[in-house]
Structure formats: structure tokens, C-alpha cells
Amino acid sequence: MAERIEILISGFGGQGVVRIGQILGQAAVYEGLFTTMLISHGTETRGGYVRSQLVISDEFIDSPVVERPDYFCAFSAIAYGMFKVLCTPQSLILHNPDLVTPDSALSARHWAIRAESLAERELGNAVFANVIFLGALSSKLKSISSENLVRALQDRLPPRYHEQNLRALELGRSL
Amino acid sequence: MKRTFDTGNAAITEGAILAGCRLFSGYPITPATEIAENMSRRLPQVGGFYLQAEDENAALHICNGGSIGGLKAMTATSGPGFILFADPFGWAVSSEIPVVIVNSQRVGPVSGITGAPGQGEFYFSRYLTHGGNYETIVLAPNSVQEAFCLTVRAFYLAERFRTPVTVLADQMVTDGWETLIIPETDEEFRGMGLESVPRRIHPGPEFYPASDAIDIPPVVLGHNTGAACSDWTPTDRGHDTEDVTWQHKHAWRLIHKIRNHRELIDESETWFLEDDPEIILVAYGTPSRVVQSAVRAARKEGLKVGGIRPISLWPFQDALFSRKASYLTVELNWDGQLVREVQRAAAPGSSVHFWGRCGELPSVRELLAAVRRLKEGKALERDGWRTEAW
Amino acid sequence: MNGMAGVLRRGEMRDVMEKYVRPEKNPGTACSGCGLRLAHRKVLEAIDELGLGLGDVVWGTGIGCSGRQTFVTWKGDTFAGTHGRVYAMATGLRLALPPEKRLILTVGDGDAFTIGFLHLLNCARRNVDMTVVVFDNLGYQSTGGQYGVTTPLGSRTDSSPYGAWEPNWTQGGFDVLRILKEAGATFLARHTVLQGHEPVESLKRAIRNRGLSLVQLIYPCVTHYGAQALGTRDLAKIYDWFRDRTVESIDADSSDSFTTGIFHDAVGSRPEFAASMREFVASVQKEGNHG
């Protein structure tokens, strides 16, 4: 039985929308799974959001479009406002309540993660917020092992950033 | 085998290098820039040349020049650069010189939308130069892996047919990330069904014979064969002539060396075509992925739906449409292009419909809704616009 | 043909034609009395005097009178480009050819200085090893006689029936060769085909240069420029007009004259592009893959 997981990540340019999708996708490939990730950029970057549509499956993925996200990482209010309509009662929306105010009319579940302040407090820099999100998200994905996630992160980031990012990942996974 | 997670841009780069490409010339343009960037890093590693041209016209001319010197060459661009190929593309067609062109289609006309997918060059890729009197080969990948394989294929066909071959991709194929498997040995290369032929050298000084033969080595200069090639109408020596008889012989060769070897070019994927479909969805490139999902979903609902995906776009595969049915093309444009060819090729008694959009892929939901409306005999609508009026 | 007697050393010229030109393309497509044949022969003489054989030269051509006259005349390897783009093609070809092969392009003034100028400038910037010989017939003659950027001001042509008035690149303080010098060309010269052996000497220097050389060879068009702008098809009168207009100094005032001589000789002063490319590629390969 095919399992298809749809993940939507969206925020401003520079928030790591594409990078954490790359790490997750790479980890899924290490697991022997199929992965697709569509990137929207260009005018959308200038217009206020970047979007990664990530699909992970144990069989060939036909449509790469995220129509009903199982997980939605909303890194900005604009992104949240734009894509919340796709969410269903089964969706889990990961957001930072300092940046995104949840819409009480939505049936989707919300998971508030104060990633920026956590990153600043624990790692001295808010830039690691996205990897905290990645850690939190990955803790829900049973098909991707912690080991392969670490390997993918090490693959996709320069060595000098490994230590702090691995700590950020662990922070996220332990939330 | 190297199993990785990468973009279509990277896949095209690696495919080209494995196929023997040793010259890339291009001009930066979204969303094909990353191919140039990857080539600038990878080509010197394998002893090849990366050359940033002053414009796309020069880029393909530089490729043509490299090719007549014996190098396998490629350029990559998007719509606004693709239009500047008319001149060098025609030269390569008429001089019968192998070269590979990648077009990552974005939204047009003109600058349009840079970072979003379009499919506006379906016909333009067929008629990229003036004057007619030729046939051309266009391949359309719908995944990162296929972008890799079809780039290798494009080089293979270009060599065998002595002609430019176009890989017609779109922004989602080139910018999209996906599982990519790259062969690391010749055995793995062949095991993946990939083929490659080395550049051979035309013995000269006679030009190509007036026949539809393929596998004749293209003209390569610098080997003192007295070989000649040019934009002029050639005689059998390659000389220029204004004689209509020679022109006809030349045109006949350009057209029929391709049309008479369709079996080497034609490629397609179909879904539930032998399962009595009443409605057949047709798409190429990334939208075909959504179509595949929609066809499966429709079958689950008990709807008699099938699907056709041409992988080689040109020459157009009329034979795919020999079944009498209701056809629905799904395209990333508002004006309807593929639909016109399907209408021409569809079996008598068929009805042909169009679902268009630009910049974003359709959703399975939307396609299912369109299928249901077709089944009920209603006109297709989207956002209150009647999309049937193509 | 009396007017040519002092210029042509006929016996020798027939020899270089027989030696290098495909018999079926001799004497070529130029009109009777056209200076283009002289220009073509100057290039062949230079090749001959350098002792180069058929295997030493790859010959490319552009479009127009010059392209048509010289295309596939060369018995060796030869090609014709599209209009104005043969410089870009030659850049790609240069990367593929062995460095010792000489790459000679015979093109027209329209091809080089208008439609192809962008590409020519970029060849100069890169100092790509090729010799561009511009057979300058003072305008667009193969299409029936229209003015170009080397047409003398005031000339009547089919597209300047009141006299050419647009600024050109040879008068009024402008010189197209100066633009090419600034762009990085390493050998530049200008002559008329009536100047005997001088153009041949410049062509030899140009062909020997491992870099971008350009020789502008001005020649008389009898059928169009002569008839339209000079009001005569009389060869002697046209040649006299040419001689009167020619100044044997490259620095002279060009407002009413063809200034001739070597404009810029910087042979060996800049690295050649294809050689630099090979060195760069070799250095990347030597240092290993950083990707």
C-alpha cells in the first residue's frame, strides 16, 4: 500500500524554505523513498513568499503537486494566509506564533513552535530556526530515520555549520 | 549507480556530460541559468569548454562552430532566449550539424513570468526557423530522471540524424528536485537503456547523398578532407546553388531522414488506453504528472478515463490518437497548442477539448471536475471563464 | 581591363587561383570588373607567400558579395556562416581546431561592422585567433546598392537617393578600427585593393598573429556603387576616383579620403583566447574536482 506524504513549506526568501526541503528530500532518498520537490520562485520571491512542495512516497510519484498537505510549515503570515485553504482536518500546521496568528476557523491542527527565540536562546542566532522546524517536522515522519536526516544535513550544509545545525535539529526533534 | 536528490538542471548537466558534451555556450536566463552554472563547474573537470556568450544567438552559433570542429555541443535557455535561436538553429538544420538545445519553458509572451512554468513553445519548437522544408526532433521530459535520460537521448539522436535536437522542458522539470539516478559505469549506462555514439568525421569532400540515410558522419572541419558546409542550398559537393532541383533534393533529405526513421524517435506513455476509455487526457511535460494522478483517481471512481503522454513531441505521433474518444488536452498555456495537433490527429468522430492554465500546475481535483463535466456533456469552465473557446 | 594593368601581376595570380581555388568556383560570382576578385587574390597571395598549404587553413565566409565570391572556393576545409554571426561560429570552431590551423574569414562591411559587430567586438575582447578580412565595397551591394556604415557621406545609393547623410564609422572623426582596437583586437589594418603588395604584407602579418586580426580591404563595386554614387561604370574612372581618395597614411584626415596602412599592431601583446581556455581547463583538471 502506497503511502504518500505531502509537505508544504513556505515563507520569505532567506528563511531556508528550499534548504530544509533539500535536506528532507535527500534524507528520503537515503531511505530509498521517492521524493519530489517543486520550487516556486522568481516573481513569487519578490511578491512575498517562497514555496516548496515536497512529496515523499514509497512508489513513483505521479503528481508532484501538494493539494492536501499533511504538514504545512508556515514561516510567515503571508505564506500562512496564502496556503491555509489547502489544509484539511488531517493537516498539521507548524508555525511560529510570534509571526503567525492561527485562524480559529480552520479545522487543521496547529503546532506552535517559537523557533526563532529558541534558536536565539540556545544557539545564539535566530538563523537556526528553520532547522528547529525541520527537526520538529521530521519527528513526525516515521519513514525517515534520524540517522539519514543527520547524514542529509551534513551533505547539504558546509562542514563549519554542522555542529550548530545538528544541535538545532536535535532541539526540534525533542519538542 | 549514484542515487541522489537533485534538480532537473543538474540532471540535464550530468546527462550532457555523460553523452560526451564538451562545449556549452549559453546566456543567463531564468529558469535555465542553473544549467549554465552547473556546466561552468562541471565541464572544465572533464576537459570541456564553458563559454558565456554575448547573447543566445551567439551561444548557439558558438555551439554550431564547436560542432563543426568535432565537439559535441549544447546550449540551454528559456523563451526569450529561445526566440534568438531562429538563425543558428536554421543553420544547423540545413548544414546538418548535430547540436542539442534545451528550452525550459516559462510563462510568455516576452518576459512573461520568469520563475513559473509555461508551455508556449509547442509549435515554436517545431518551427524554430524560417522557410519550412525540414523536419525536427523535440523531446519533452516530465521528471528530473527523464530530463537526464532524454538529454542523453538528444545527443544520441543528434549524432545519428545530423541535426539539432531540442529538449523541451519546463520550469518545474528544471527547477524541481527529485530522486535522480546517475549511472557510474558503461554497464550501468547501458543497463538504464541509454545509448551514445561518438562523433565521427565525414570523409568529404562530397556532401551528404540525396537520400534519407542516417548514420552518415556529419561534416567536421580541420581534418583536411575538403569538406564544406554552409547556409546555402548545397549541391552534392556542398557548393551553393540556386537550382530548385538541388533545393528539392536537399529539403527531401532534411524532411525524410527524420520522418522515415520514426521508430528511433517515437516515444510515449499511455494509461488505460486498452481499457476502453471514453475520455482520454493528453499532456506532455510536468502537467502530465498530474494527469497521470487524475486518470488513476478517475478510474477509482469508475470513470472510463485514459491518458496519453507524448515523450517525443515532434515529429508528432498521430498514431497515438487513432481511437475514437473524447480527448482533453491539459496544457500550461491559455491559447491551446497541443490541442490543435490532437484535433488534427484524432480519429474521425472524436471530440477534442482543452484545459489550459499558466504558471501553476492544475490540481487533480480540477482535472477530475473537468472530466465529470465532459462526461455530462457540459462546456468546461474555470473561474467563470469558458476555457473551451480556444 | 587596361586600368588594372599596373596593379595585377596576372601570371602569378592565375597561379594562386589554380593552386588554392576549386576549379568549378573560378572565377567566381563577382560582376565583371569588380574589385572583389582582386581582394580575394590578395588573401590567396598572402597565404601563398606564408607557405601555407590547403591543410593549414580553414576558411569561413559571411553573407553578401564577399561571401558569395569566396564561399567554397578554398580547396581545403571551408564553411559559410549566417549573416553577421560567422565570428561567433568561428569562436566555437577555434576551440575545437588545433591551434596551428589558421582560421580565415572573408566577410563584407555590412556583415562585420553592422549586423555582426556585436559578435566581432566580443571576438576582439577575447582575442580569439582568427583573421577577419573585410572586403569593403562601401555599402550593401549584393542587394542592389544601399548605404552602410562605410559609405562615404553624400553618396547616392538606392536607399539614399538624396545622398547618404547618417553618420558613418569612417568619417567625421570616427574610425571603426579604433572601436575594434579599444575592444582588444591585436592586429588592425586598412588598405584598398589597388595598393599593390602592401595589403598582402598586412594580410601576412594578420594571418601569422595568434589573436584577433582584422584587415579592411576597400574595393570598387562597379555595378552599384560606381553606377549610383560615382555616376559611371567606366572602370578607369572608378579606379581613378579610388586612387585620388586613397592616402598612404593611417593617421591622415579621413573626412574625404581612405586612410590606409597598419592601424594597430599589438601582435603577441595579449593572451589568445583558445590557448587561455585550454590552460584554464588544464588547471582545473590538475587541481582536481572541487564540485
Image (cartoon, rainbow, N blue to C red):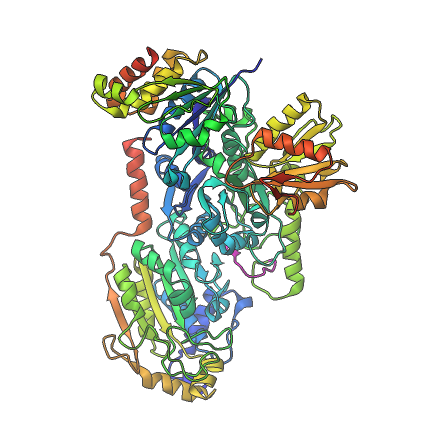
Q: Is residue C150 left or right of residue B225?
A: left
Q: Is residue B227 magenta?
A: yes
Q: Determine the residue located farthest toward the front in the rendered image.
A: A105
For residue B227, above or below residue B157:
below
Total residue callouts: 0
Query: Is residue B365 highlighted in magenta?
Result: no
Q: Residue at x 43, y 73 (%)?
A: C13
C33 or B131, which is in the foreground? B131
* Magenta span of residues: B226-236
> Farthest residue in the right direction?
B349
State whether residue A170 appears in this view.
yes
Q: Quadrant of the image for the N terminus of chain A?
A: top right
Q: Quadrant of residue B238?
A: bottom right
Observer-nearest of B78 and A37? A37
Residue B237: image location, x then y, percent: 58, 58
* Residue displayed at 48% across by 43% down: B106
Quadrant showing the C terminus of chain A: top left
